[in-house]
Amino acid sequence: MTRITFQLHDGTQRTVDVDPDTTLMRAAVDNDVPGINGECNGCATCATCKVQVAESWFDRLPGIDEIEESLLDDAAPRTRLSCQIAITPDLDGLTVAVPISQYA
Amino acid sequence: MNFITTMQPVPDHVPAELVRNYPFVLGNITSGNPYDRMVHDVHRFAPPVFYAMDAYPGGSPAWVVRRFADLRAIYADDTHFTVKGFAPFAMMIGESWGNVPAEADAPLHDQYRALLNPLFTPAALKKLEAKVTSVAEGLVAKFRDEPAIDFRAAFAVPFPVSIVLDLLGLPLERMDEFMAWEHMLLHDLNMEHLQTATRNVVGLFRDVMKERRVHPGEDLVSFALNARIGDRHLTDDEVVGFCFNLFIGGLDTVTTNLCWQFRHLGNDLELQRTLRANPALIPDAIQEMLRFYSPASTFRTCIKQIEIGGVTIKPGDKVLMATLLGSNDPEQFDHPEEFRIDRRPTHLAFGSGIHHCLGHHLARRELTVAMNTILRELPEFRYDSSVEVLTDLGGVIQPRAVPLLLAAAAGSKGASR
Ligand code: HEM
Ligand code: HEM
Ligand code: FES
């Protein structure tokens, strides 16, 4: 189990324990974390699964490929597509912030 | 209907009990609101996967998959399904371009998307906001003193056309021409008209390309001509495909959603008042309306046998991807027939998977600007249900008119600004 904390824009937090073999987006959607839509279901086309990663964690995540990069043009710093982050044991304790809207 | 219709026998792998009627077929019309009952009746009475003999345009059969989860799985599955050949526009006039990127499969598709995505991010589109707002205000100014309007003709059609013309760097004076071609492409079942319109649109794009090669601008045609995939430029066919895709993907869909949204607001005065009092709720209202009125249906072709919901689908079989069904699936959405502003649903209006709508942020921005502007500029309006309105079913579900009664001319309500 990997423990992940989502900071919601209303100031509250949601902490969930996640099995491996999933992605951060799936973990959020399966646990009804509000504010992460995942319209394309993890295919890196919709950019409705954005999260902002805590500073201390950003460099420890897997790299950003060309497609993800193309969707994050001009996004807030340290933004990632949560569907492109595979859950692994070394992400235990990861904290990410959910934006107020995936559409703004 | 001028398509040649041949009644085909039911193939051996299709069990007879799965052959059903599907009402939302190209060419069918209804005088009611199909989102009131028809769409929910499909969920009530049909099996999860069924076979309709006339579901594919031209009157050939296709599987209809009605569950959100199954549709999402197919959208994400390029092992068993392809999008190739689902838009025969090029073929129809003997040319070779496909619609970039809708008709391309991975990995070429990924390269197209990587190229185009930055043009359609929320940040990129913010730059358009002022222009989009002034287009909306200009259209409203033309009818604000009328007692009654057809909102479809007065706003829902010209609004997205102006924006796409602007994106492509074409002069607004060509608006009427553009609208006529769009109509022929998407709402005319006559094969000759379709061919003529396709030729005209493609001819226009080829002319514009020639001109932009010499005089590049800030527009998307110039962008596409300059763009590179790996170490090569896009071919002319690719640029035409891209433009054509923008044209068919970005006009009618927005028009249709505007039609349903303002018909809804004209019938639900309480919602209209809530949104006027609290415009911050408009994005949530639009998200739920996109679910409620998901208009588009496209197709996939099976390329490798697969079982879905216990049903065998064979290579060559067509599968209808009806977003209206997925977005109204009662297994996914609690009481989908209820409009709930606080639902904030993840719906299928823009598809899903690798072809998820490239223009969804643009569409959302257009819809939000339209609702913001109209609720700000116009006093309370009502839907005129005394007018009979026919709705075309098929690739896009669109009413032929949206009769609205405006309070402005009556003067009774007083201007709210
Ligand atoms: C973006 C969403 C799209 C919508 C909503 C849309 C809309 C439509 C409409 C309105 C029709 C005609 C049906 C009618 O008259 O009611 C149609 C037909 C069709 N569209 Fe789209 N279009 C969309 C995108 C695309 C794209 C991106 C492609 C291909 C790249 C495409 C391919 C087709 C095909 C294959 C037909 C059937 C044409 C025929 O066989 O006669 N559509 N579509
Ligand atoms: C509310 C309005 C819109 C709706 C409901 C809509 C719906 C859709 C749907 C359902 C698809 C997926 C088709 C499939 O997978 O078979 C799609 C794809 C697409 N749409 Fe939209 N669309 C809208 C607005 C726009 C706009 C404004 C543009 C202009 C940029 C656009 C451009 C595209 C393109 C290029 C694709 C193909 C993407 C790909 O294949 O990767 N759409 N749209
Ligand atoms: S779920 Fe669509 S980009 Fe992540």
Image (cartoon, coloured by chain):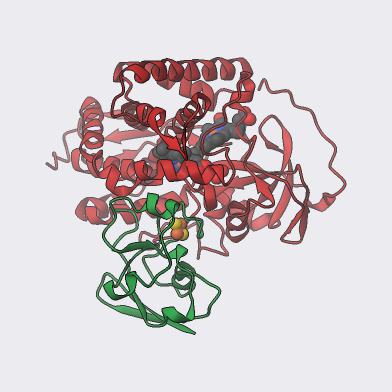
Chain colours: A green, B red
Q: Which residue is more in the foreground, B314 or B161?
A: B314
Asked whether, in this view, residue B176 is left or right of residue B20, the answer is left
Q: Quadrant of residue B9?
A: top right
Q: Quadrant of ligand 3?
A: bottom left
What is the total number of numbered labels drawn onto the structure image?
Answer: 0
Residue placed at 52% from the left, 54% from the top? Answer: B327
Instruction: Give above or below for B316 relative to A35.
Output: above
Q: Quadrant of residue B67?
A: bottom right
Residue placed at 43% from the left, 67% from the top? Answer: A62
Q: Which residue is more in the foreground, B290 or B36?
A: B290
| Residue B344 x, y percent position in the rendering | 39, 61
Q: Quadrant of residue B124?
A: top left
Instruction: Give above or below for A23 relative to B211.
Output: below
Residue placed at 70% from the left, 54% from the top? Answer: B49
Residue B259 appearing in the image: no
On-image quarter of the C terminus of chain B = top left
On-image quarter of the N terminus of chain B = top right
- Report the residue that reaches farthest toward the front: B231
